[in-house]
Amino acid sequence: MVQKDSTNGKNQLRVGRLVKAHGLKGALKLELYTDNPERRFHTGAEFTLQVPEASPWHGKDVTVREYRVMNGNPVVFFDDVDDREAAESLVRAILWIDQDDDEVEDNAWFDHQLVGLDVVRDGTVVGRVVRVDHFPAQDLLIVKSGEREIMVPFVEAIVPKVDVALGQVIVTPPAGLFEELPEATDDEDAASSESAASE
């Protein structure tokens, strides 16, 4: 999980995504990006919404009326969201919350903590983080490797460890992410041989 850098003097942490409307009274099912939902989603908690500019919710905040777990699913109710139609207008919105500077959540980093870190695979530096891109499904580390920029999904299976103190991001990428697969190289060699022969 990546925290947005400071905005308006405040740091913000992404804590959830609204997945679908639930029932008829404005409830929404949540996909959680926090280890402590009861603390984050207490009554009166305010969230900044990340929604498309065309959404009627663009630029607005929401306030939690109630949080509960129903049939094993986290569900949240917001003030002024009183029916299913209103809830459906919030589906896919991402929730950000203001965070104290000294507050740290497990497996959460600010963009500026990640940018500049060496990317290490099997003990070898293969690149450096140049930026972080935020998308609804996941965050991407953009890694400069030689002349290429590589998009690395910031998920535990591929990025099992971040060590800010050591200045390293450990990666276990799938084959082909950081190097061209042998088949691709052979095809390119064949293509260049053909073009040389035709000249």
Image (cartoon, rainbow, N blue to C red):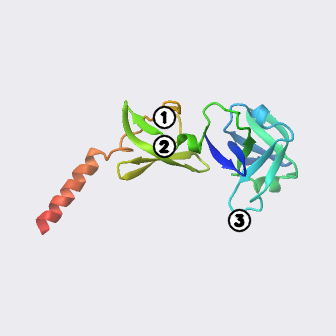
Tag on residue 54? Answer: 3
Name the front one of labels 2 and 3. Answer: 2
What's the residue at 57%, 44% (across, down)?
A: 112
Spatial separation of the CA atoms under disc 2 and disc 3: 34 Å
What's the residue at 76%, 54% (across, down)?
A: 88
Q: Nearer the N terminus, badge 1 or badge 3?
A: 3
Instruction: Name the amino acid type tagged 1.
Output: Gly
Instruction: Indicate left or right for 54 with 23 as reference.
Output: left
Instruction: Name the amino acid type tagged 2.
Output: Gly
Image coords of residue 137 (percent x, y): 59, 47
- Judge the density around disc 1: few (<14), some (14-19), many (≥20) Cα neighbours within 10 Å: some
What's the residue at 20%, 54% (across, down)?
A: 189
Residue at which label 2 appears: 116
- Judge the density around disc 3: few (<14), some (14-19), many (≥20) Cα neighbours within 10 Å: few
Tag on residue 107? Answer: none
**How many numbered callouts?**
3
- Check the image and name the residue furthest to the bottom: 199
Tag 3, which secondary structure?
loop
Residue at which label 1 appears: 167
- Judge the density around disc 2: few (<14), some (14-19), many (≥20) Cα neighbours within 10 Å: some
Tag 2, which secondary structure?
loop
The image quadrant of residue 113 is top right
Q: Is residue 81 visible?
A: yes
The quarter of the rendered structure image containing the N terminus is top right
Spatial separation of the CA atoms under disc 2 and disc 1: 8 Å
Tag 1, which secondary structure?
loop
Name the front one of labels 1 and 3. Answer: 1
Instruction: Name the amino acid type tagged 3.
Output: Ala
